[in-house]
Amino acid sequence: MIREATERGEFDNLPGMGRPLDLSDADDPDWWVKRKIRDENLDSSALLPMPLQLRKEAQGFPGSLRSIADESAVREILTDFNRRVREAHLGSRAGLPTLITAHTVDVDELVRQWWALRAR
């Protein structure tokens, strides 16, 4: 199949043709994941353990909610966040100390901050 594809010219003019391969990170077993994240500018926070994902999400409040136009949607997001934090506290099997787990948020206070952001 490779010979036939070569004869049809399917491998002609591929990006990087004639240049050496970049194997500088080949000793890292996760090189391909890291390169994919870098090359496609992907958000790597999904690779973090859940407690750290929650902390990162909490650090973005209320700014990350700014584009949401409906207060009930904001409350729903924050309530869901608190539910996920409680689940992480109850089901923490990752071996991470609880001090790095996120804390629940005050929904009413963050809604007030969200309104202030929207007013600006």
Image (tube, rainbow, N blue to C red):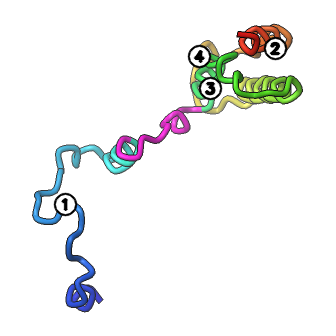
**Residue 87's image quarter?**
top right
Disc 2 and disc 1 in contact, CB within 8 angstroms = no
The span picked out in magenta is 38-49
Task: Reply yes or no: does residue 47 show up in magenta.
Answer: yes
Distance from Cα at disc 3 to Cα at disc 4? 7 Å
- Amino acid under disc 4: Ile
Neighbour class for label 1 at 10 Å: few (<14), some, many (≥20)?
A: few
Disc 3 and disc 1 in contact, CB within 8 angstroms = no
- Amino acid under disc 3: Pro
The quadrant of the rendering that contains the C terminus is top right
Distance from Cα at disc 3 to Cα at disc 2? 23 Å
Whether residue 87 is visible to the viewer of this picture, yes or no, is yes
Residue 89 location (% of width, % of height): 73, 23
Disc 3 and disc 4 in contact, CB within 8 angstroms = yes
Q: Secondary structure at mark 4?
A: helix
The label number, if any, that marks residue 52 in the structure image: none
Q: Earlier in the sequence, mark 1 or mark 4?
A: 1
Q: Residue furthest front?
A: 120
- Amino acid under disc 2: Val
The residue under label 1 is 16
Distance from Cα at disc 1 to Cα at disc 4? 43 Å
**Residue 3's image quarter?**
bottom left
Q: Nearer the viewer, mark 4 or mark 2?
A: 2
Residue 97 location (% of width, % of height): 59, 18
Distance from Cα at disc 2 to Cα at disc 1? 51 Å
The label number, if any, that marks residue 100 in the structure image: 4
Side (left or right) of 63 relative to 38: right
Q: Earlier in the sequence, mark 3 or mark 1?
A: 1
Side (left or right) of 76 relative to 37: right
The residue under label 2 is 111
The residue under label 3 is 51
